[in-house]
Amino acid sequence: MDTSILVIAGSDSCAGAGAQIDIKTAAAHGVHASCAITALTAQNTREVTAIESTSPDMMLAQIEAVFDDMPPSAIKIGMLGNADIASTVVDVLACHADVPIVLDPVLVATAGATLTETSVFELVRDTLIPLACVVTPNIPEATELTGVEVTDAQSMGRAARVFLDAGARAVLIKGGHDASDVLVDRLYAGEDVFEFTSRRLKGEYHGTGCSLSSAIACNIACGMDLVDAVREAHAYIARALARPLELGHGTRVFDPLRGSRVWSLS
């Protein structure tokens, strides 16, 4: 039987992040992506100019429609936007606790705009994190959600412990905002720590966190254990970023399809 995931995320009008890049990422993995859109955003590689949230009723209807007809094998949660949307997502997913959730706590766009209201932070920490099989914050998001200023591997470990103590089964803290020459993503699962490294590329990239979390969800949906799912997703992103698109005038965009192993062999 074919495999599908459910993407719960905002729409990105330049298709460099959000639900649009999640769909491309799923396609690169041979997985179907159903979507429940949390908000419309008007944005490009330089700025976010407008955000309009989905109503809670419509949010609920989207998720229920997917589960009623094509239940997903994994769920990726990205931008939530506001507390009403977050509460709706929590309530409906509590009825589907058997489906693994990859939670990417999107707070700020790469271009700098706030995508999630401050009122959502505690709700995410107290209700969504315990539902997730893995949480995938970047360094600023880990700092914001835990109160631990992440500056090095030691403080990253302290922040990870806050997530684990809050009920997360695992946390992947992404090293993209670090300044070292080597990019290191660290997965904390119980007492175990796994490091995934790749060469740091010049410039800022749009949508890497969205694509990484979706790749993890696809790998889990296809039957991988968490460590292998993260390892493969990290390598996939490295391959995709090595072939950026020459589009836009701000942060760089990439084509998730170029991260597939089929492309890398061509």
Image (cartoon, helix red, strand yellow):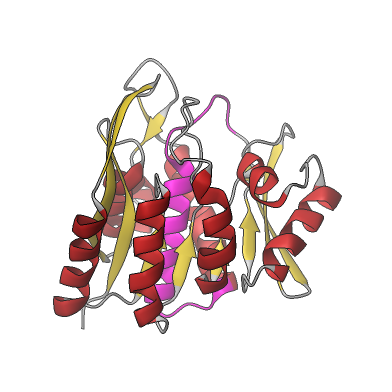
- Residue lying at 53% horizontally and 67% vertically, measured from the top left: 127
Depth check: 166 or 248 in front? 166
- Expressed as whole percent of the image width and height from the top left, the position of residue 42 reads 27, 28
Q: Is residue 29 above or below residue 94?
A: above
Residue 98: x and y in percent read 41, 84
* Residue range highlighted in magenta: 201-226
Q: Nearer the viewer, residue 94 or 265?
A: 94
Of 126 and 150, nearer the camera is: 126
Residue depicted at 53% across the width and 41% down the height? 118
Q: Nearer the viewer, residue 79 or 127?
A: 127
Say if residue 188 shows up in the picture: no
**Does 206 lie within the magenta span?**
yes
201 displayed left or right of 80: right
Q: Where does the N terminus fall, quadrant-wise?
A: bottom left
127 within the magenta span: no
Residue 127 vertical position relative to residue 47 in the rendered view, above or below: below
Q: Is residue 169 above or below residue 145?
A: below
Residue 247 at x, y percent in the picture = 31, 22
**Residue furthest right as drawn:** 154
Tell me what residue is drawn at x 47 percent, y 37 percent.
242
- Side of 169 relative to 70 (left or right): right
Q: Is residue 240 visible?
A: yes
State how many labels appear: 0
Identify the residue shown where x is 51% and y is 68%.
Answer: 229
Please tell me in which quadrant of the rendered image residue 7 appears: bottom left
